[in-house]
Image: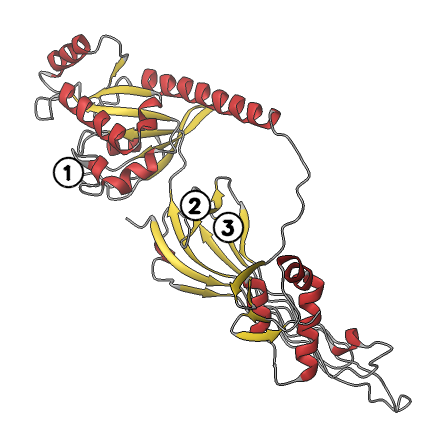
Amino acid sequence: MIDLIRMKVKAGSGGRGAVAWRREKYYPNGGPFGGDGGRGGDIYFAVDTNETTLAKLRYTKNVKAGDGAPGMTKKMHGADGEDVILRVPLGTMIRNAANGDLMADLTKPHQIVKIAHGGKGGLGNYHFASGRNDAPEYAQPGEIGESFDLQIELRLLADAGLIGFPSVGKSTLLSVVTNARPEIAAYPFTTKEPNIGVCELDADHSFVLADMPGLIEGAGQGKGMGFEFLRHIRRCRVLIHVLDMSPEGKEPEEAYRIINAELGSYDAALLEKPQIIAANKMDAEGAEERLQAFQQAHPELTVYPISTLKHEGLKPLLYAAYDRIQEARQAEAAQKKEAEEIVVYRYEPKKPDFTIENLGSGHWKVNSEKVDRLAEQVDFDKEADTYQFAMTLQKMGVDRALARAGAKDGDQVIVGTYIMDYHI
């Protein structure tokens, strides 16, 4: 089942600014004329409602956006790098694989999010002209684009999910009441991936129904493909528990107990979801006796007898599901409104892009991905490049932070893989 993949993404780096001079007929002593580098391409993820799995990304291990082009003479801007848009199904969650942080949760049709930002293009040398230096030989390098190792996980979004043991008739029920066409056969585990369809009760009432692959005992501990199956159930508002009432099926009371035990073992919150009981295969001989025994064991449950084979008893089941879905939607809306009402807005000063670490004995380290990326682009053999890099650190507040931390004149500061002298 293709619902969990990993990949590395890297946004494009910005193009380097140009060092160029005005060389035209009536400007014999023209000044700096170098243009800015282009912006690096971004990486986006977008919801495609035609996609139902992550199969198309299965063998995509590395994705890179285009780099920005270098600046040109006559202050001409380099071309921006090409963006990359990766299309994924509704319900896709994108996490930073390094720390598990959720970066995006794609829960709306046609939603699009930027995951990795392209680097800014470097400034051309005409930006650095000043009264002290009217002929700067320096242009900024472009910023390196962001890169991440991602874990991409699909959790289907459905109003109601069909759960139960294999071969109880979940796929048949889905095919009868929706436009979905799942594979159906008389053997276990026909459904390898969740199937989804729209159940239209009438012109004004419909909901999304998903057929979850059959669970087995031990699924909550990962037996079979339990974790993969249970992951999708988390997002369903209502669960329709299909029980096989035919003598050939597992005893309904035992099946009901085992499935709920597995749900609770995986995530106790799943037991809080509204659950509707669909007693299937009522056309079979002996089904009525098994139904009565189950109802006696669970008088607190409302059970809907159905026959997917004969298309009997389906409307009461579906309308009951719709009502529970509406209740769940209203509860979600109320919770969201309550959360919005208690939000307190307060001023929070912008955090710096770096931290200062005291290594002892007059040695300091600047910890910053941004500064490290800038340092990689600097040619420290060129005095102008080194000077401009030092000025960039000063503008970022690194010098002030070092002074507050107790750095002394002549101390050494590690930036990336380079060591610089600190001077007050």
Tell me the element at label 2.
Answer: strand
Amino acid carrying label 1: it is Pro
Label 1 and label 2: CA atoms lie apart by 29 Å
Label 3 and label 1: CA atoms lie apart by 35 Å
Amino acid carrying label 3: it is Ala
**Proximity of marks 3 and 2: CB atoms separated by less than 8 Å:** no
**Circle 1 residue:** 188
Q: Position of residue 113 (x, y in %)?
A: 54, 50
Q: Vertical placement of 397 versus 75: above or below?
A: above
Residue 416 seen in the current view: yes
Tell me the element at label 1.
Answer: loop
Q: Residue at x 45, y 18 (%)?
A: 327
Name the foreground residue: 413 vs 339. 413
Count of all numbered marks drawn on residues in the image: 3
Q: Which mark is residue 93?
A: 2
Furthest-right residue in this view: 26
Q: Vertical placement of 131 versus 372: above or below?
A: below
Q: Position of residue 377 (x, y in %)?
A: 59, 75
**Circle 3 residue:** 46
